[in-house]
Every structure is written in structure tokens, then in C-alpha cells.
């Protein structure tokens, strides 16, 4: 049993990396064919593909009554996306960030966490006996998801005129196969990596909430990590930033919205510390745009993000 899980665990990493490579190439080809910006592609196609593991894990976990994994997976994934994924991406290649991203997309990712905090704290805000992310809360989250998609649909018209696309032309069907094949590989790879990580964590006797915040979150963030690292290596930093911000927004508005509509998600008051840290990390990303070289996430900032992530992981394991 353990051997087969470990084999799939290793194979999952291979699928994640190759799937991310195919997805990035296919997404860039779509941007070329449709004459839209890399940022818009990162916020939509790539983000949806790399968010599939979070979506599947949260849906399954919530359906089985494992709410700690369902919410912990999302919060931990959002933290990993900023500190780990952007940290690694910035070290590979400094990320130059657009003005609109600084003032719109980054604040929107912070607002998503803030809205989640308001919706799940029924006991603190309204004096309820318990807190839950209800079906009506899910409708609210999906409403904001719809607004976000409307906003993203305006980006191609606004940005594409100012971009120079130098990608080679690829026929339509190969592009479709690259995107679909990359997404499937990421989905399977993410699932196998998470299954292996959860299995090993349970052998070590870790609590469910800690599993969700650390190992599961890290596992479901591997698609973002692989995709953004490859995109940064190819100097497609707009895809890196768009993928991270899009994934963080989709994790809350889309994943938790769908999960809570299917079945309400109980929220433990102790999770507020992790929710607060997720807000803090989102705020830190915004502040970093004005420290040092403006609107550039350079290698030193990336190294700082990685240091904070290692500290967070250490604290989470100690707390668990």
C-alpha cells in the first residue's frame, strides 16, 4: 500500500511539471491567437487549470465531513501561492508588475480573503452559537466570482493593443490538446501528490487541520509553482503574477463558493489565526510594490518570501 502510494507520489511530481509546461505553452499560444494579454490568460485559463487540485480536494474533503482540510487547503494554498510560488518565481526572474495589477488585482485578492473572514465569523460578528460557511454564503462568493470574470473579460481589450507578441504560430488543435493535456496531467499529478502526502502525514499522526494547511496546501499549490516557475524561466512574468492572483481569487470565490453550496462548511474559531495570516500575506504583497524598486518583485524580495514561508511552515507544524 505504502509503496504504490509513494510511486504515485513521485509520478505526480513528473505530471505536474510536464503538465505545467504544456499548459503554459498552450496558454501563451491562445494569447497570441486571440491577441489578448498574457495577464488575462494567467488570470483565467492557467488559473483554472492550476486550481483544479484545490477544487477537487475541497469538494471531496467537505463531502466527507473533513472541513478542516476543505478550508485549511484553501488558506494554506493562498499563503503558499504568494510566499512560495512568487518567491521562487522572483528568484528565477524578477517580476515586473503592471500598475493596474498593483491597484486592482492585488487588492482584489486581499478583498476575497476579507470577505471570507466576514462570512465565516457568524459567532464573532453576529453572536451566533457557531460559525459556518452556508449555502447563502456560497451564493455571495459565486456572485463575486461572476464580477471577477466580467472584469477579466475587459483586460484583453485594454491591454492587448500595447503588447508585442512574438510567439510562434501553432495550429488550433495542437493548442487545444496542449491545454487539455496539461490540465489533466496537473489534475492527476496534484491528486496523486496530495494522496501521498496525506497518507504519509496520517502515518506521522498529524491533525487534520495541520494536514490541510501544510502538506495538502503545498501539494495543491505545486501546479501553480511548476507553472509559474516555468513561465518565469520563459520570461512570461505576467502569466506568473496572473496565475497566482487568479488562483487565490478563484480559491475563495469559486472553490469555496461551490463547496459551500454543495454542503455548508463548519468553521472553527481557531482557524481565524490562519485566516488573519492569509490577509497579512496578501497585504505584504501589496506593500512590497512600494519597497525598493517600485512595482518589481526582485530576487531579494523573493528570498524574503521564501524565508517567511519556511517560518510559517515551521510554526504550523509546531502548533500541530
Image (cartoon, rainbow, N blue to C red):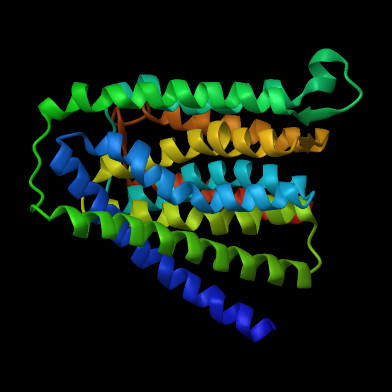
Residue drawn at point x = 37 percent, y = 28 percent: 291
Q: Position of residue 303 (x, y in %)?
A: 42, 49
Residue drawn at point x = 69 percent, y = 38 percent: 262
Q: Position of residue 137 (x, y in %)?
A: 68, 24
In the image, taking residue 66 as reference, residue 226 lies left or right, namely left
Front-most of 107 and 289? 107
Q: Is residue 111 visible?
A: no
In the image, taking residue 184 as reference, residue 309 lies left or right, namely right
Residue drawn at point x = 48 percent, y = 50 percent: 84
Q: Is residue 297 visible?
A: yes
Q: Position of residue 87 (x, y in %)?
A: 42, 48
Asked where in the image residue 274 lies, by quadrant, the reply is top right
In the image, taking residue 92 as reference, residue 148 lies left or right, namely right
Front-most of 260 and 193? 260
Asked where in the image residue 140 lies, by quadrant, the reply is top right
Q: Is residue 89 above or below residue 149?
A: below
Please identify the quadrant where the C terminus is shown. bottom right
Amino acid at each position: 500500500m505504502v509503496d504504490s502510494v509513494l510511486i504515485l507520489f513521485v509520478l505526480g511530481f513528473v505530471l505536474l511539471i510536464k503538465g505545467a509546461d504544456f499548459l503554459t505553452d498552450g496558454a501563451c499560444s491562445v494569447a497570441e491567437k486571440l491577441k489578448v494579454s498574457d495577464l488575462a490568460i494567467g488570470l483565467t485559463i492557467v488559473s483554472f487549470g492550476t486550481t483544479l487540485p484545490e477544487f477537487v480536494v475541497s469538494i471531496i474533503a467537505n463531502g466527507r465531513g473533513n472541513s478542516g482540510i476543505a478550508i485549511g487547503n484553501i488558506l494554506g494554498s493562498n499563503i503558499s501561492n504568494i510566499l512560495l510560488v512568487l518567491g521562487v518565481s522572483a528568484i528565477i526572474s524578477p517580476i515586473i508588475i503592471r500598475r493596474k495589477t498593483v491597484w486592482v488585482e492585488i487588492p482584489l485578492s486581499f478583498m476575497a480573503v476579507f470577505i471570507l473572514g466576514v462570512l465565516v465569523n457568524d459567532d464573532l460578528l453576529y453572536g451566533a452559537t457557531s460559525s459556518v460557511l452556508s449555502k447563502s454564503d456560497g451564493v455571495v462568493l459565486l456572485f463575486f466570482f461572476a464580477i471577477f470574470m466580467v472584469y477579466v473579460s475587459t483586460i484583453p481589450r485594454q491591454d492587448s493593443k500595447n503588447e508585442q507578441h512574438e510567439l510562434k504560430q501553432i495550429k488550433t488543435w495542437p493548442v487545444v490538446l496542449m491545454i487539455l493535456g496539461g490540465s489533466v496531467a496537473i489534475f492527476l499529478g496534484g491528486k496523486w501528490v496530495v494522496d501521498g502526502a496525506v497518507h504519509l502525514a496520517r502515518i506521522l499522526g498529524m491533525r487534520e487541520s495541520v494536514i490541510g494547511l501544510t502538506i495538502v496546501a503545498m501539494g495543491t499549490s505545486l501546479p501553480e509553482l511548476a507553472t509559474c516557475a516555468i513561465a518565469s524561466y520563459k520570461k512570461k512574468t505576467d502569466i506568473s503574477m496572473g496565475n497566482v492572483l487568479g488562483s487565490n481569487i478563484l480559491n475563495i470565490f469559486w472553490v469555496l463558493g461551490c463547496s459551500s453550496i454543495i454542503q455548508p462548511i463548519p468553521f472553527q474559531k481557531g482557524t481565524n489565526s490562519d485566516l488573519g495570516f492569509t490577509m497579512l500575506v496578501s497585504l505584504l504583497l501589496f506593500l512590497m510594490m512600494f519597497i525598493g524598486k517600485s512595482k518589481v518583485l526582485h530576487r531579494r524580495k523573493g528570498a524574503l518570501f521564501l524565508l517567511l514561508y519556511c517560518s510559517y511552515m515551521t510554526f504550523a507544524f509546531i502548533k500541530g
